[in-house]
Image (cartoon, helix red, strand yellow):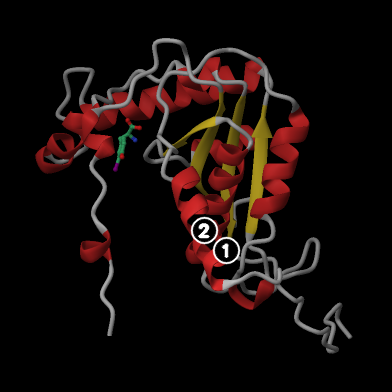
Amino acid sequence: MDGKLSGTTPFPAGPDLSDEERIARAQAAYERLSTRRSCRAFADTPVPRAVIEYAIRAAGTAPSGANHQPWHFAAIGSPDKKRAIREAAEAEERRFYGAEGDSPKASEEWLAALDPLGTDASKPFLETAPWLIVCFAQRKGGIEEDGAAQNYYVTESVGLACGMLIASLHEAGLATLTHTPSPMGFLRDICGRPEWEKPLMIVVAGHPAQDASVPDHALRKKPLDTISSWL
Ligand code: IYR
């Protein structure tokens, strides 16, 4: 059987709601999610591991290619590991931003696009925040533990899981940042992950620092009639 299950189970019934109740729920979900902001200054206030565990469990329910669940989440809470990640990430970011006098690896256009966010090579939040969740995409593995099967739609699948991770952390009242030092191969070494896993992003989670702020640029969301068409 190779661990594959061939039966079926009845599709679970959704809640018995009127259309009005459904609209109200959809609106409430939108309103809650729309308050999420990327946070770039975190307090060192601890967050229980159980919160992170449930958020990772929720991420692990995401749809994925052939249900192979091609993700691994390394939850980093230890100060030593956080420091190692900060040091390696900042070294890459200094090259990206050209902070050491060399010409930046990033194009002028890219740096101009980041200007309204006010980001630079300094990433103190990687040590201050209580949790760094390093999200890995598994090029192979299949559904079996230690499997060798090819995985499919890996980036799409892990992107969906990361979205659900962030939404769950937001629901739990935490601030998050999706951080993408570039390149980020060093995360594989620090987290002790195998070469067929590709780090996709770090999800930083915790409470915002008292002086955390949101750049106006981040508040500009495209309206419904731009992001959708109805045919
Ligand atoms: N990794 C860099 C640059 C960066 C790139 C994008 I695209 C962003 O939306 C934000 C930052 C950094 O973290 O500073």
Tag on residue 161? none
x%, y% of residue 189?
A: 59, 37
Q: Secondary structure at mark 1?
A: helix
- Residue 164: x %, y % from top left: 57, 52
Decide: marks 1, 2 in contact (CB < 8 A)? yes
Going by the image, does 81 lie left or right of 105? right
* Left or right: 143 as drawn, with respect to 189: right
Whole-percent x and y of residue 138? 60, 59
Q: CA distance from mark 1 to mark 2?
A: 5 Å
Quadrant of the frame with the C terminus: bottom left
Displayed quadrant of residue 16: bottom right
Image quarter where ligand 1 lies: top left
Give the residue number, with chain letter if any, for mark 1: 21
Q: Secondary structure at mark 2?
A: helix
Residue 161: image location, x then y, percent: 58, 56
Which residue is drawn at the image coordinates 52% and 52% (left, top)? 29
Q: Is residue 192 visible?
A: no
Q: Nearer the viewer, residue 53 or 137?
A: 53
User: Farthest right residue?
Assistant: 1
Q: From this view, report whether residue 1 is shown above or below residue 91.
A: below
Residue annotated with mark 2: 24
Q: Is residue 195 visible?
A: yes
